[in-house]
Image (tube, coloured by chain):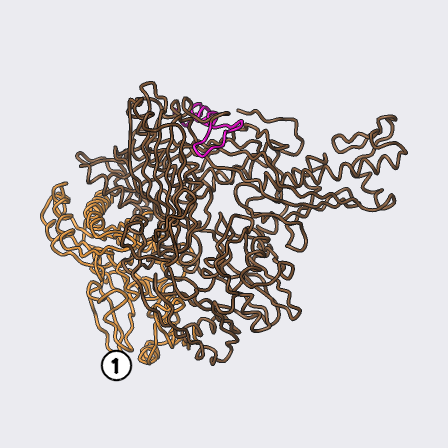
Chain colours: A orange, B brown
Amino acid sequence: MKEIDYAAPATLTEATALLARKGARALAGGTDLIVQVRENRRDAELLVDLKNIAELNTLRFDAKEGLVLGAAVPCYRIAEHPDVRKRYPGLGDGVALIGGVQIQSRASVGGNLCNASPAADSIPALIALGASAVIATPSGTRDLIPVEKFCTGPGRTILGPGELLVHLHLPPPAPNSSSAYLRFIPRKEMDIAVVGVGVALALNDNRTACVFARIALGAVGPTPLLVPEAGAALAGRPLAEADLERAAELAQAQALPISDMRGSADYRRHLVGVLVKRALRIALQRVKGG
Amino acid sequence: MTTSTTGYKVIGTRPLRHDGVDKVTGRALYGADVQMAGLLHGRILRSPIPHGLLRSLDASKALELPGVEAVVTCADLTDPGDRIAELGEGAVNLKHLSSNCLARGKVHYKGQAVAAVAAVSAHLAEEALKLIAVEYEGLPHVTDVRAAMQDGAPLLHDDLVTESLGKPTGKRSNIAKHIQFKKGDVAQGFQQAAVVIEREFHTATVHQGYIEPHNATALWNADGTVTIWCSTQGAFTVRAQVAELLGIPLSRIKVVPMEIGGGFGGKIRVYLEPVAAALSKKTGKPVKITMNRADVFEATGPTPGSYIKVKMGADKDGKLVAARATLAYEAGAFPGSPLGPGAMCIFACYDIPNVHIDGYDVVVNKPATSAYRAPGATNAAFASETVVDELCEHLKIDPLDFRIQNGAREGTRRADGPVFPRIGMVETAQTAKQHAHYTAPLGPNPKAQISNPKFEKAGDGANLGFEISGLRVPRRGRGVASGFWFNCGLKSSASASVNADGTVSLVEGSTDIGGSRTSIAMQLAESLGIRADDVRPAVGDTDTVGYTDVTGGSRVTFATGWAAYEAGQDIKRQMIARAALLWGVQPEAVAYEDGTLRCLSDDKKRLTFKELSEKLHATGGTIVGRASVDPPGVGGGFATHVVDVEVDPETGKVTVLRYTAVQDVGKAIHPSYVEGQMQGGVVQGIGWALNEEYIYNEQGVMTNASFLDYRMPTALDLPMIDTVLVEVANPGHPYGVRGVGEVPIVPPPAALANAIYQALGVRMDELPMSPGRVMAKLLAKQ
């Protein structure tokens, strides 16, 4: 491991200027980046520590505005936040799974998104919940990008030189709605998702039919995938078993799994079906139970 | 159930371990803690390809990097020629051992060491590796045992000729050796069978997974002596190997065994020690090398993947009449898989009149395998104990009754020849049958848990049960399996000095892996009639203690404990002589009982051990007891396990709900450490059974060389492992000790496979029984 420069800017302007330099990498919790640099999986000449920037540490909910989730907010703050638990439980499911106590204290959802692992546990729920990424650019503008378009490949995002993720914005939840994230791992902990599924759905006022649903998949493609047809198939349906089965089949059809050390393509496709149904049942139960 | 002698004062109690405080406070010194002035850090350059010729190696650019002090290659080790050396734990081909430390002209697996660098920091050494230019000529590779056995397979070694039944065949192949054990007439035996089951099995390569990576620090002094601090199961075998590989006399080398963070058989062969020594010789400075986890997986010795075919037959009364097995074990890059013990163990639990076993030791382009806890036996038992379960199903016989009926007992002859002395196989099956676990209701399948209201748990809901019409719910099953493993004797030494305060300082030569310091000290304490706390045990280096073989083969408590017992007898004789001197009587007139010396001719003359200890300096000096033993009378161990599982029929994920391990332990010296060995063995067996495996891509590269993707079970994946100690004393040991450390790893994969069968109705024939494999079997059945 060679010598690496380090900077800890206090403002977005400074940060974007530093990140425009050659070999610069954004550092939030560092739980992915430091390991990757040490193992020669990513190169870095300058680490730009973002944790001193106020905008990146914001975590607030407002019934009109929705949830603003700063890119450097550590996981434990999100997982323990009462509004997240109540209104965005799918996000809570995913965030709570990221690492043990020490990792939870460092790792951020912003970092999880920017690391762009296809198996990231927070991203399918963010996509299902309709989250957008707010990006700062060196020219001072703010871009707004749906999370499903943020990752462009394993380890790659749309961020260009000098650009950085400021916060994620989640719209206020619809009435009679809820969400869930489920992953499958062979162990109980200490594992990477073989498949992850995030769902969000809303029911009508008398809770007899689905108004809308969004389903996103992890670890079955080069990026986390939104599978719009699977969600759309549930709109107007009573969410009987046959409806869930239909959504599961559509999700399976859109999955693009590969075979690797974590599972075969066939097995992953099978799990997509199982987890979509299970996640939908959990979200449904949460609406009805809450 | 117990046949052991009772009435012990120390044996069978649970004193605190002597090294306990150092271990729990982090003060105990491991190899990575070694520091000294001028220490250089070494790193190893490893082959990126699984098979190829080393065309050239140019380290000039690396040596130009400031802070880099030396580079070594195989040229810096002595050319061992084609020699076999007896190094205490079995014969070793020195050419292969040397090539495994630093490749000689050819690489045989991805990760094989090619060169090493010493630099002033580990980071610089790492950078320097990138500056070494190596030219390889890639060759086709083979990583599967059956593919490697076929004609036309890429050959790993030009000079490897198959040896069959002890004789060279002249045929060049990857099959290094064919062995055979026969007893009776299997063809005739199968004719008497009412039920015959024949099945084929595959098991994956697995690693011991010790927490502490290999490490070695070496100082080649100006006087030509070499000191090595390392993590090893046997300081003396390190000394012998290093002497051969460096071509220097044994007496020039001192090996200091540091505390060890697990070995399980994998820390017997040397990897880093001769390399660190060669770097130290070149630089004149101490050099430390530590492996990272990927190095450990890719370049140390896992245990073989295997192919096993088993055929067993029983008559209508459930009596086993014949058994046939073919085992093919992956040796890895160089010959020497644990095929022999696998073939000896495969049917060792049973009294079978007609047996025929063939075994093949096969080289493949994977790291050279080494010992792993009951080497070879777990693979074998997975196959044979699954077939036994199927026989029981066809015969409608309770599987434990079957083992009680057919179990090996005193007088049973194993297929490989030896006749068992008093053993406890049948007792383990009887005890398991009487255990509450065996008859406890498996429980109804759990009711619907669609939503766990605590959302933080919902993410683990991939394993939740659902009770919705039309959906399947988790299935439970119970399985049993038995296993056998040997007990080695081998050589052990101990010396014990009596201190003036009535304590005894014990120095012995066995690396303490599972609490053996205390178990050995307890046997000395028992023999002297003093408290375990009054013995201060220490593990000596190779200049401090007499020759002692490796910590392995479930031998230490048996053999080094025996040495401590003999050292105790030596002290007793000298204490008696000293008391006789004090009292002016003949030694025959002094009795030594319960730690007290008593004059037989004058009942008022009595001295406790402590009282006499105080008088030693005034009566001729201190007393040192010594012993060096190579004991016969080894006592093999049997185990029978019962396990309950729950399987998610939608994902194939297996959860272990309850586990009971019953084992004949001879006599448990320190029951907590015996239980710890049993629990540890079971957990490793569960990992092997369910998720652990070396996964290779088409380029012959292991794709999961990390603890993240090489999935050992964590504490969260396991229930409490219940243990039941059956004590059928080993008649060959003063205190009835048997080997206990290895056999508990043998039954778990078969027990789990049998439980999965009961849960799902599918027979698993491949390890690991990972969720994807279980699901594939289930989907194929539907």
The foreground one among B263 and A184 is B263
Tell which of B6 and B320 is nearer to you: B320
The image shows residue B439 at horizontal and vertical percentages of: 38, 24
Q: Secondary structure at mark 1?
A: loop
Residue lying at 32% horizontally and 56% vertically, measured from the top left: A95
Would residue A191 be found to the left or right of residue B418 on screen? left
Task: Indicate the position of residue B431 as horizontal and vertical percent values.
Answer: 46, 25
Does the segment drawn in magenta span residue B419? Answer: yes
Q: Residue at x 67, y 51 (%)?
A: B545
Q: How many numbered circles does the render carry?
A: 1
Using residue B617 as the reference point, say whether residue B269 is left or right of it. left
Give the residue number, with chain letter if any, for mark 1. A139
Compared to A236, does B114 lie above or below? below
The amino acid beneath tag 1 is: Ser
Residue B512 seen by the camera: yes
What segment is highlighted magenta in the picture?
A: B413-440
Residue B690 within the magenta-colored segment of the rendering: no
Farthest residue in the right direction? B584
Compared across the picture, whether A39 is left or right of A198 comes to right
